[in-house]
Amino acid sequence: MQASLEWIDIDKILPNPLNPRKDHSIKSNEMQDIINSKGWEEGITCYKNREYYIILSGHRRWYAAKTMGALQLPIFIVEPPKNEAEELDRLGSVQGGQVDWSPYEWAKFTYDTWKNLNEISYSELSKKLGVTQGLITARIRVYQYYPRIEVEDKLENGMYSITMLYYINLWINKLNKYNKTVVESLGEDFIRKQLLKKYENKCFNSQIVNDKSLVNSNNSQEIINFLTDITKKLSDCQLDIISKNQAKNNDFLQNNLIVNTTTNDIKK
């Protein structure tokens, strides 16, 4: 099928259900100003599905035009995708360079693509999407772990980052492994929400991914104190643990010295 440009009734044009962006009204006023001042410099991209046209690229322009009361839109009609996996692939390829998807929307797109490709390896998906394997891992884990309402807006405004949310998830996983009683007593939902508040309060940075002293601590109360106080810094807790361990070591050495001296005295 040869791509063609046609003017189509706006009521016949539908948003793509696979598009990760759920709010098409973002920056709609600016988009309306552009359309009013410059007109339609290019059409939106759609494929035909029975009597309707499904958008592959141009959701914000479609929404802005609909809001303005436009009756028709210029659209490029292209070959329909053969399956959902191909549709996701084309949606990302077309949109990626033109639309400022939010970090959460990219996480959803990455996850949906991975599922539709029968959960191929992160390495393969990394090559397919042209991003690092680490970012693929972080996007999928974040999308799987956090409720959308909990993180989407703060990812959008830069308060959160995909990488830091992934590191928090890794820390909770380690806590589950080494101090499961703490997780069972507080509840994982509570711990996750508290860590997000502490993240907002700058109580830790990316070094949380390297934390071993607190998350592996034998003293559950130290961990509980850290989690329940949203102003307590991870670094302070780590210093407390180091200081206590040094004090214990000093006591041990002092006791050994006393014992050795006493033993020597007895031998004499």
Image (spheres, rainbow, N blue to C red):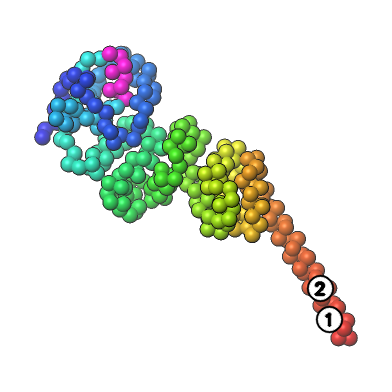
The kind of residue tagged 1 is Thr
Q: Residue at x 17, y 27 (%)?
A: 52
Residue 207: give x, y in percent of width and height. Answer: 56, 49
Q: Residue at x 50, y 38 (%)?
A: 160
Could you tell me if the residues under marks 1 and 2 are in contact, i.e. CB atoms within 8 Å? no
Q: Position of residue 248 (x, y in %)?
A: 74, 63
* Residue 152, numbered circle: none
Label 2: how many residues lie within 10 Å, few (<14), some (14-19) or many (20+)?
few
Which label number is shown at residue 257? 2
When the figure is inspected, residue 139 is found, relative to residue 23, above or below; the finding is below
- Res 67 quadrant in image: top left
- Give the farthest residue toward the front: 185
Stretch in magenta: 60-69
Q: Residue at x 55, y 56 (%)?
A: 180
Residue 188: x and y in percent read 53, 47
Q: Is residue 59 left or right of residue 72?
A: right
Say if the magenta span includes residue 63.
yes
Q: Secondary structure at mark 2?
A: helix
Residue identifier under label 1: 263
Q: Could you tell me which quadrant the C terminus lies in?
A: bottom right
In the rendered image, the quadrant that contains the N terminus is top left
Residue that extends furthest to the bottom in the rendered view of this protein: 268
Q: Main secondary structure of the magenta part?
A: helix
